[in-house]
Image: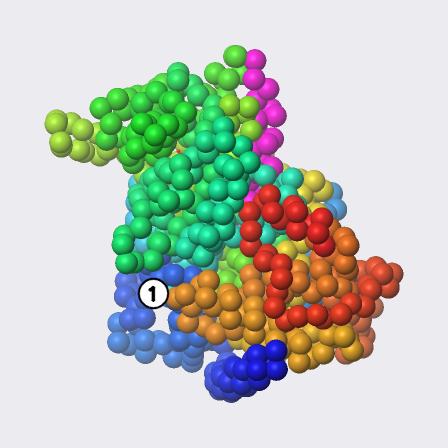
Amino acid sequence: MSDHYERVKIELQQMKEVENEAAADEEQLPPASVSPIPADVSFTARRDLSKSSINGRSRSKSRSKADGRERQVNGKQLPYLTPQKSDYSQGQSRVSDEPNLHIKGTAKLLKGKTAANGHVESCQRQTDGKCEHHGKEAKKRRAVTVDTSKAKTSLEALKMSIRQLKWKEFPMGRRTACDIYWHGVSFHDNENIISGQVNKFPGMIEMLRKINLSRAVRTMQELFPEEYNFYPRSWILPEEYQLFSTQIRLLKDNDSTLKPTFIVKPDSGSQGDGIYLIRDPADLRVISGSPIKQSVVQEYIQKPLLIDKLKFDIRLYVLVRSLEPLEIYIAKEGLSRFCTEPYQEPSQKNLSHVFMHLTNYSLNVHSGNFVHSDSCSTGSKRTFSSVLYRLASKGVDIKKVWSDIIALVIKTVIALEPELKVYYQADIPPGKPGPTCFQILGFDILLMKNLKPVLLEVNANPSMRIEHEQEVSPGVFEYVPSPVDEEVKVGVIRDTLRLMDPTQRKQHVTSSTGGGSPEEAIVVETGSDEKEGLADSLPSLCLKQVFPKYTKQFNYLRVVERIATIFLRFLGVKGTMRLGPTSFRTFIRNCKLSNSSFSMASVDILYIDITRRWAGMLPDSREAGMCLQAFIEAFFYLAARRFKALLLREQVLLLLEVCEGALEAQSHSEKPRPHRSHTNPASSQSSAPTTFSSPALTRRRHRPMQLSAKANTEN
Ligand code: ADP
C-alpha cells in the first residue's frame, strides 16, 4: 500500500508538471479572432477525423491554429476580424451555470444557458431576417447559402433539396461565409469554420464507433437497466474477453439446453464488414500471435420479426438539431432492408450465411435474390411505412411499435449527449468563434418477433445516396436511380435544411437581469414543426420533433449529463477533453467531498488508479488525464461509498445534489445572484460518512447489464 502510494505520488507529480506546462502554453494563446472563409480553399492543416481514433486527435494543435491571429490558406496569410463581443460573451458561463431546463408552453426557457449548440445565436447569422436582439430589419430576404463542396455521396440528394427550397448552392465553396456547410464525413471536412451551421458535430464519428456506443449505453444501463434494455448485451474486446468467456461458460453450465449465438463486430467496421457469428467464445477469430481485434461481441437476436420469411431491419433518420438545448427530430419515413435468403434460427450449419443473418444492403445487393423495385412496398429495400401498413393489416398495434421506437431513439441520444458535449466544448469552446452544429444520424433498428425494437447501431454518416448499384450484365455494376431512396432521403435532407433555415428560426435572446448577466434567460421559439418552413408551399415536414416534445417522459434519464456538466466545469475551456490531477482535486475540494475518512491523498490514489486503467482501455490515447468515462466511474465510486445500501441511481442522484449544491453555494459567495434554482440541501444531510477502505476499485463499472443490476442492489 505504501509502495503503491509512493508510486502514485511520483506519477501524480509528473502529471501535474505536464498539466502546469499545458496551462502555461494555454495562457500564451492570442485572443479569439474571426475570419470570413475564402473560396476554393485547400487548407494546409486539414484533418480527416473519420480516419483518426477517439484519442488520436491532436486537439491543442489544431485549436491553436484556429485561434491564432493569423492562419494560412494556400500559403497566403489571411486577415482576421475581431468578433462582436455580444456574439460570444454570453457563452462563457454556459457550462458552469445552471443545468436546469424549463419548458413553458411552446417556448423553451433556459436559465443561465446559451442558445442552441451551446452558443448564443449571433445576430451576425441572422442578417437576412428580422434580428430581434438588435431590432434590425433586413430589407430583402436573400437566399440561404449552402457550401456543398464537401458533400461527397450526399451531393445528389442535397442538390435536389436546395433546388426545391430555391436556396443558393456553392459547389466549390465560397470566399465569404455560407449559412450552412454540408459535410460528407466529419465536422472537420472544412477546417476553420467560424460562423454558420455545419451538418456534423465534433466527435460524433468517434462516439458512434461500436465500442463507444456500447460504453455510453452501458453507463445508462447501470443507472436505468429497465429503460435501456433495448440494446443487446455486449462485451468489449479484447479487454472483456475473460469476462465474456466466464459468463458464457456459467450460463451454459447452469442450463445445458441454452445455445446462445453471438455476433462479433469490428469496432470501426461498417456495411457488415468483418462481422461474423459465433456460438462459443473459443470461436473468436484470433490470428495466432496477435491480440484480439478491437471489437464488440454482442448477444445475437435469434428471433427477429420476419416478413415473407425474411429478416429485415429498419433505417431511421434522426436529426439532432442541437445539443444545447437538446432537440431531436425523427423522420416519419425510413427504409426497411431485407435479407435475401429465408431466415432460420442460427445453427452451426448456417452461421456463415450472410444473406440470411445480415440485413446490410451493401451485402445483399450482391445476392442473386436481391429484388430491385420501383415500388416502395416490394423488393429488398422498402419504405418503413409500407412495412408498418403490412403489419397493421395483420392486426399489429403499430402505434405502440412507433412509440417504442421513438423512446429508443431519445434514450440513445441521451446516452450520447454527455460525451458529445465534451467534444463540442473542446472543438468550439464557449466564448470562441465557431459554427453551430446539427446532424442527421442513421439508426439501425431490428424488430424482434414480439415487436420490441432493438438498437443495432447508429451511423454518424448514413448513406444519402439516391442511386443504387445494379448488375447490368454479369459482374458489371452500374448506379441507377432508386425511387425508394430518393423519396426518403431527399425529404430528410430538404426538411433538415428547412429546420435549420437561419431566416426562419427565430432566436429571442432576452435577459431577466440585464445583458451579459449569468442569470440571462434565453427563450428559443421554434414554432410548431408543422408550420415551420412552409413558406413556399412545400410539403409538410417529414421530420417530427420528439425532444423537447417528450421532455417530461425522458428528462429524468439525463443524469450523466449532470455529471458531465460538473466535469466540463472543472475541465475549463482549454480545448482539452481530459481532467488533470489538480482539477480533479479542485473538484473534490469545491464539492466538499473529502473529509477525515477520505483524505486528499486518497483522492490522488483514486485519480491515478482510474485514470491509469482507462489509459489501458484507450490504448491509442495521446492526451493524458481523466476522460469523461473515467470521471463518471470515479463519480459512481464516490457516490457508492458515500451513500451505501442504495441503488446506484439513487446514490448518484444524491451525490449530484451534494456537488451541485456546493458549487452553487460557491457561485453565490463569489458573485451574488438574484435568483437561482437550487438543489435540495436536505438530501446532503442524508450523507453518511464512510471509510475509504482501499484505493483499488472493487466494483468494476463496465460490465454487462445483468451484472449492473446486481451491482445496484449490492450497493
Ligand atoms: P455494420 O455497421 O457493419 O452494418 P451492424 O451492427 O449494423 O454493423 O450489423 C450488421 C447487420 O448484422 C445488421 O444490419 C443486422 O442485420 C445484423 N445484426 C447486428 N447486430 C445484431 C444482433 N445483435 N442480433 C441480430 N442481428 C444483428
- Find numbered disc 1 in the image and state the secondary structure of the residue it sits on: loop
Is 127 placed above or below 428 here? above
Which amino acid does the dot numbered 1 rest on? Arg
Nearer to the camera, 130 or 52: 52
Residue occupying image coordinates x 64% and y 40%: 227
Q: What stretch is highlighted in magenta?
A: 395-417
Residue 140 point in image, percent of width and height: 49, 51
Identify the residue at image location x=37%, y=22%.
343
**Above or below, 573 relative to 273:** below
Q: In the displayed structure, would residue 565 be above or below residue 584? A: above
Q: In which quarter of the image is the N terminus?
A: bottom right
Q: Position of residue 34 (x, y in %)?
A: 46, 72
Up/down of 349 relative to 282, above or below: above
Q: In which quarter of the image is residue 400?
A: top right
Q: Where is residue 541 in the image (x, y as percent from the top left)?
A: 52, 34
Q: Is residue 234 left or right of residue 346?
A: right
Whether residue 681 appears in magenta in the rendering, the answer is no
Residue where numbered disc 1 is placed: 47
Report the magenta stretch's main SS.
Answer: helix
Q: Say whether residue 132 is visible.
A: no
